Amino acid sequence: MNGELLYKKVGIPRAISYYNNYPFYYGFFTFLGIEVVLSDKTTTKIINEGCKYVVSDTCLPIKVFTGHVVNLLDKGCDVIFVPSIQSTGYKINNCSKIRGLPEIIRNVINRDFTMIEPTLDKTENISFRDFCRDTAKYFGITDEKSINNAIDAGWKVYNDFLEMTKSGVGYQEALNNAISGKVVKKSVDIVKPLSVVIMGHGYNLFDDRISMNIIKKLEKMDVKVYTSLNVSHQEAVDSIHNIGELQYWANELELTGTAAYYLLNNKVDGIIALSAFGCGPDSLMVDEMMYHCKEKGMPLIHLTIDEHTGEAGFVTRLEAFVDMLMRKKRSILNKQSAKTQKQTAEIVKIRDNKILTGSAK
Amino acid sequence: MSKTNLAEDFEKNKMEDTIPAKDRIIAWPRMGRVDIPLKALLLSLGAKVVIPPPNSNEALEIGVRNSIEGICLPYKLNLANYIMALDKGANTLMMFQAPGSCRLGNYTKMAQKTLKSMGYEFDMVIFDMYKSKMKQTLHAFWHVTHCINPWRYYKGFSLGFNKFFAIDTAERLLFYTRPRELNRGDAEKCYNKWLKITDETNSVWQAKKLKKQIIEDFKKIPIDKNKKVPVVYLIGEFFVLLDPYTNQNIEKELGEMGVEVQRQIMFGDWLEHVLKPSIFYRKESHRERSVKYAKDYMKRAIGGECIETIGDTVYAAKHGVDGIIHISPFSCMPEIVAQNILPKVSKNEDIPVLSLVLDEQTGKAGYITRIEAFIDLIKRKQMRKS
């Protein structure tokens, strides 16, 4: 099969859809005999490189994506995978910038390179299978059978990954295991005094540079962190409907679905919303969740990040929020214990009275 | 609640029905001159209407106070229009929505929620501009008026359409005449006069004649026909293009600097394309033309007016236009993509492009300076050519 391939390597930038779909991409491309080259992990240099190419109003994730594409080109990989995910359901569209990702990359980077740019658009009846077929076509593969097998191989890696994350394995660990074909499950759930859910896109949350290691920071403060990875797609969709909203944005499901799921089952003490500055859909959806949180009395903090966010200020806000949650929980517990103390005192009193009046005989 | 149930509920929610049709007082958000034709349509269907005051600093302040920080400028003004109309006695709000384009699809739902939580009582009537548009539109107008007389519909729609076309014609002529007029202010006066006459016209027969009369009247204004006037295309986001408050009356500023403005998005044209069934619409629509011209730069439409922006720029370059001014509200997603693409188009097609981003804090002086510098650049380029 290798003889027919037009390109032997494909570069996948470590940004945007990488954080949601990489296990699938890996399984798919590897099965077809294409070597996957990843860009380096996000650094300040990569972000600055990206900022040079796009206009300043563009949001951080797109700048990071551009930086990663440049990084891949510098590495000598000139076949780059830039998918355009337009919609994931009828009238459920993505944000314009994600829809037009190939459009941006083609026009801002004036270098010679090949772009693999398949489209997924369910509103216009371009299904996921068409998306994969389109991808394979760029490499000169038109054999239906091998494409179908490659899709199955992709799903296998992806399902392994989801199974692991659902059981509580961290993002990076699950990814590494899924790629090497292992399935590891976490059997013991550590109980911590506080738990929060972070609602944020994968590309913000699991990128250590962009999110400034927020998950590790919270875990250091003895807080258990839930993310979109702990909620399955079906649970997210159901929670959105149960809370009384219709899904409008495609990739906002990982925010709203996760927040709604934990809002409904009362498993967490607070919600942290993490979004990039100038993100259009996020600004609406965080507001929508804020409305539901107010109704249910759930604390929510909205943290906005951009390329200049100072780490110190970020940590201060996180610490303040955690402190606030701690105080709230303590006061609730105190009230409860006071109530029980009062009740026991009353019981004792009644009993004593009965003894005194002699009715206990 | 099951999924289908919720979807049905949502569909029902789109056209709320708590107020009897005869008690309805209808209002809609303002955008440029939309109120004149819409008023004519609703009045001929026998409805009562309230027109909110024009967009102003005061309106913007109300909008900003009641909406979230990250939302785009058009929503803030829409919300202010609703609030002002409700304060003036309206009880039914009409708005169209186009799901899947950009944040516009969320506008109505959000406004509904915000206004209800502010304690207003009203009906919101939303009509989709996605598929089967004419049917949806007719249904929405039937819903608010309960008018079943087909003659009235005919009268209303033809009045509305003719008024739209009349206003568009007047605007086009105004843009043409303003930089060339001998006595400053003639064109503006004439335009305002016809706007008033259009508003007052009440019969289909007269409305049909409006266009011709406007053309004849504009011909009477003395102009300098041999004056060399640079031509600038005004492109960008739909709302800011059509709303003179939001774009700080950029057309007038440019006209007074001696520049002929051509705006590619005209509300009448857009409406005709959207509402007319495709069998009757024979012309090449704006969208089709844009897709054709933009194909070297964009392979897919990505929502909003992004592809129109790129397509128009290429079209302008190929048809001898001197420059492009691209305006968009702050954080408008499709226009940010367009902004990223425009530098390359500008370089490859050799056409100067100025991108202006508008928000509620744009200072007018800085804005004018940039436009002036841009016009100087165009003129110098023209001189070098000749």
Image (cartoon, grey):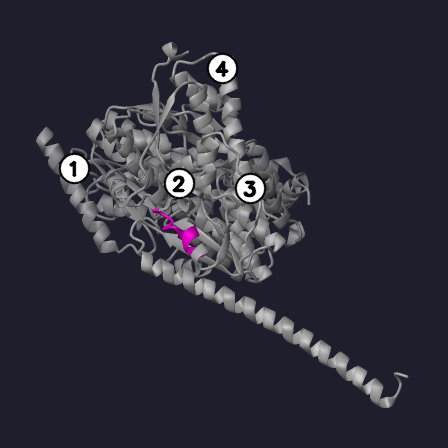
Question: Can residue B312 be seen by looking at this rendering?
Answer: no
Disc 1: host chain: B
Indicate the amino acid at tag 3.
Lys
- Give the quarter of the figure containing the C terminus of chain B: top left
Residue A91: x %, y % from top left? 53, 35
Q: Nearer the viewer, residue B131 or A310?
A: A310
Q: Residues within 10 Å of mark 2 (few under 14, many from 20)?
A: many
Q: Residues within 10 Å of mark 4 (few under 14, many from 20)?
A: some
In the image, is residue A212 part of the stretch drawn in magenta?
yes
Q: Which residue is mark 3?
A: A166
Residue at position x 68%, y 74% in the image:
A340
Residue at position x 25%, y 26% in the image:
A76
Tag 1 and tag 2 share a subunit: yes
Which circle's residue, 1 or 2, is located before the other in the chain?
A: 2
The span picked out in magenta is: A209-218
Query: Does B20 appear above or below B132?
Result: below
Q: Which residue is mark 4?
A: A146
- Tag 2 and tag 4, C-beta contact below 8 Å: no
Q: Nearer the viewer, residue A284 or B81?
A: A284
Q: Is residue A105 left or right of residue B36?
A: left
Mark 2–mark 3 distance (CA, rounded to whole Å): 60 Å
* Tag of residue B347: none
Indicate the amino acid at tag 2.
Ile
Q: Which residue is mark 1?
A: B378
Mark 4–mark 3 distance (CA, rounded to whole Å): 30 Å
Q: Residues within 10 Å of mark 1 (few under 14, many from 20)?
A: many
Q: Which residue is mark 2?
A: B167
Indicate the amino acid at tag 1.
Ile
| Local SS, label 1 | helix
Tag 2 and tag 3 share a subunit: no
